[in-house]
Structures are given as C-alpha cells and as structure tokens.
Image (spheres, helix red, strand yellow):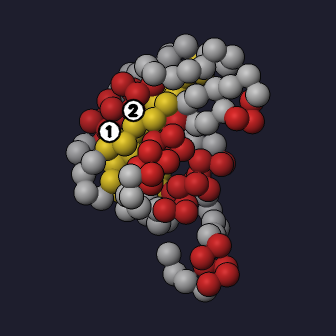
Amino acid sequence: MTDQELVDRATEAMKYSYSPYSHFRVGAALLAADGCVYTGCNIENSSFSVTNCAERTALFKAVSEGVHDFQAIAVVGGTDGDRKDFSYPCGVCRQALTEFCGPDFRVILGKADGEIRVHTLEELLTGSFTLREVLLHEDV
C-alpha cells in the first residue's frame, strides 16, 4: 500500500469523527504487517478525559483482534475537516504506538493539498521506553 493510499483511508475515517466540542476531526489508518488496515477517528466526550484519539482507536481495534505487528500509520485532521496543516499524534498516542511498534515505525501525515510528510516513531518520541524493557530487560 502506498503512503497516499493510507492517507486516503485516514481521510475517509475522519468523516466518522465525533467531535462536537472541538470541531477538530481526525482520522487514522494503521497498516498491519499482514497488509490489513485498521481505521479510527477521534471520539470526544463531554468529560474530556474520556475522549479517544483516532490513532488509539485504530490501534485498539487492531490489538482487540489479536494484531500486534504494524508497519505504518497515516494521520490527517483539521477543524471541521479542513486539512490545511499536518496533524501530529499527541504524546499519549505516540506512547501507545511505542508499546507495539519499533523505532522505525512510519508515521505518515497528509494535508488536503496532497503534501505528505513521513517521520519515524523514534523521531516523534525520542528516548521512548516500554515497561518490558525496563522491568524485564527485553529488547522490543
């Protein structure tokens, strides 16, 4: 799957965003190693701490189906769906991805004008760790 195809899937997922408070719609498309794509959107709640980001929605959908091996995620977003800027994963999403994805995992960001920016997870969360590494001294 190309980066653009993954961005297109994230853009489609953004349409399902439930964001009545911020009006900031986000869509994500997570590419598993087996080629399956898991999509997600942000889901807000009047109790803001209950809100879930698009990236974690996609990740949790995949993990809940037994998938733990991923290649890339595309993320798009903007106020009322206007994708004029890049939308980066928040810190919580970056940490959640770190639990299942290595430092070379690709994070693909897309804007409405077709511009795409690609980062590795290591670039976005430098010096990250997992408890498996700390407590069990396992390499991830």
Any part of residue 31 in sight: yes
Q: Are discs 2 and 1 less than 8 Å apart at CB?
A: yes
Q: Which residue is mark 1?
A: 6
The residue at 69%/16% (across/down) is: 21
Residue 97, percent from left and from top: 53, 55
Structural crowding at the residue carrying mark 1, measured as other residues with C-alpha within 10 Å and reported as few (<14), some (14–19) or many (≥20) = many
Please determine whether, in this image, residue 91 is positioned above or below residue 18: below
Name the element at disc 2: helix
Q: Which mark is residue 62?
A: none
Structural crowding at the residue carrying mark 2, measured as other residues with C-alpha within 10 Å and reported as few (<14), some (14–19) or many (≥20) = many
Quadrant in which the N terminus appears? top left
Residue 47, percent from left and from top: 76, 28
Farthest bottom residue in view: 137
Whether residue 84 sits left or right of residue 133 in the image: it is left
Q: Which residue is mark 2?
A: 10
Q: Nearer the viewer, residue 138 or 66?
A: 66
Please determine whether, in this image, residue 45 is positioned above or below residue 58: above
The residue at 61%/86% (across/down) is: 137
Residue 107, percent from left and from top: 45, 48
Name the element at disc 1: helix
Residue 113, by quadrant, is: top left
Residue 10, percent from left and from top: 39, 32
Three-letter code, disc 2 = Ala
Q: Nearer the viewer, residue 79 or 119?
A: 79
The Cα–Cα distance between marks 2 and 1, rounded to whole angstroms, is 6 Å
